[in-house]
Amino acid sequence: MDDGAKIITEKLCFAYRKRAVLQDIDLALPARSIIAVTGASGLGKTTFLSIFNRLWEENGGGTCRGRVTIRFADGPVDIYGKEMSVSLLRRRVGMVFQAPNPLPMTVFKNVAFPLLLQSAKSRDDIAEQVETMLKKVHLFDEVKDRLDSDARILSGGQQQRLCIARALMSDPEILLLDEPTSSLDNTACARIEELLVELRKDRTLIMVSHYQDQVRRVADRVFELADRQLCRIW
Amino acid sequence: MSTFGRLPVVLFRLAAFGSGLLTIAVFLLMLFLGWPLLSGGQFVHLIAEEWSPDRGLYGVFPMVIGSIAIALLALCFSLPISLGTSFVAATLAPRPLRRCLLAMVRFMAGIPTVVYGFVAVFLLVPFMREHLTGGSGLNILTASMILALLIAPTMIVFFVGGLGSVEKSFCLAVDGLGGTKVQKLLYLQLPQAWPAMVAGVVMGLGRAMGDTLISLMLAGNSVAVPHAAIDSGRTLTAHIALVIAADFSSMEFKSIFAAGMILYVFSSVVVVVLRLFTGMAMRPTG
């Protein structure tokens, strides 16, 4: 086992309705870095991401074998172990989806939603944390007058930054990003990239991306998914 | 668009127009047949008076009370059952169990009313008579309990449809944030499915108000105004069914049109009020 690794997979296999998607993958992914996964469409990049927060289990039809260990701040955890709570895992391994998916509620409530799930904090604490998080994703100045408006009226780029702020609200140690800029224009894309580089300082980011330029700009390590295997490119 | 291409559109519009027209026509027919009562100023008496043909009183007030009591009581029994079942069937249960549960609910919806009535007459009525209500066991409570079972599948199907229609991306967002199934239900699905839930309640209430056989078989059909759930009672629908065999020109016969009109107006008012309420609840506040 790699001593400096944040995530370790051993003989990881994944099949969807008996069709093998990933086969015997052994990886050691470093902490505080951006790991990019590239590859042709339909080969299972999103599935690969969803293995780390067990989100694939929501769709059914999948089978996962092997071992995935994450070294959280309080010790290593086999995320498919019997004592692992899926809800807790997903609060520690956040996810940002390909298309921005703000919930049908206000900007404020969207960002505060993870705190509602944890049923903690006073009203003032929540407001303070929402503001901090919106500032962290450089969105506060743009939405400070619209905190009580429906989040779905924001632009695509703003929505995606809102989703990143929401994902960061439960302070995850790992952030999974499934093509987070694919539906955005160049300006919005550049802002998200800057944000990802900032987030790398204290988090591990695993990002699926089709854009080679983007991967070169932000990633520390790049893998290509092909023939059910992940090959390290650099 | 070609004539052949336009044909389905025209047919669908005709069907929609026809069904709307039919609804109005039913009301107009009842109005026409009940006009002698309305024009003679007897309609108000019919609603407010008791039913005692021996004394020349043909009021349907006891039946109005009976209908409302049975329908509301049935809704009270059915709502928690339907909500619980729909939560399990839509979200909480594992996928195979959900499918099984929904198949059973749909099967329940297809069982003829008279079967529920029969089962109740042989199982529930003796139980109520001996252990709970005394008397004949035929009363408002017995009828509303079975009516609750009858309307539950309709409500469950609406509730499950509403809860299941929440956009998948929203559900995925909550899953991704570590929301449990119960949290997803409470914070996302229920607020989103609110209109469908109200529609389910309206449909359930409408079905409870409109059902004839259960109240006819189980409510006891007393024409006295019921004062308690264990009293015997008669609904408007049961009253129409019981009186329809009377002489066509008698006052007794004419009174059933008043009963029909009350039923029609009452159902319409309930639907309109609930629709307005839903509209207000759904209006954005931010």
Image (cartoon, helix red, strand yellow):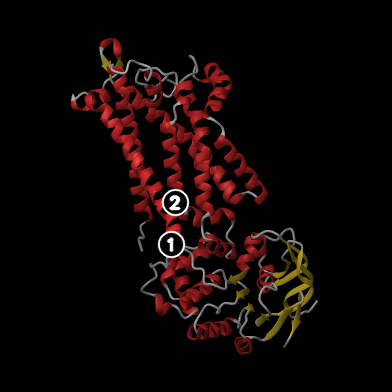
Residue for badge 2? B194
Return the residue at label 1: B2
Which quadrant would the N terminus of chain A be assigned to in this image? bottom right
Where is residue B148 drawn, in percent x and y? 49, 33
Q: Is residue A26 visible?
A: yes
Q: Nearer the viewer, residue A43 or B241?
A: B241
At 38% from the left and 68% from the top, the residue drawn is: A149
Q: Is residue A205 visible?
A: no
Q: Residues within 10 Å of mark 1 (few under 14, many from 20)?
A: few
Q: Is residue A202 left or right of residue B262?
A: right
The amino acid at mark 1 is Ser
Residue extending furthest toward the top? B54
Location of residue B218 in the rendering, given as x and y in whole percent from the top left corner:
48, 22
Q: Is residue A227 left or right of residue B142?
A: right
Closer to the chain start, of discs 1 and 2, is 1
Q: Residues within 10 Å of mark 2 (few under 14, many from 20)?
A: some
The nearer-to-camera label among 1 and 2 is: 1
Q: Residue furthest left?
A: B40
For marks 1 and 2, give the CA distance: 41 Å
Q: Image quadrant of residue B131?
A: top right
Regarding mark 2 in the picture, which secondary structure is present there?
helix
Give SS at disc 1.
loop
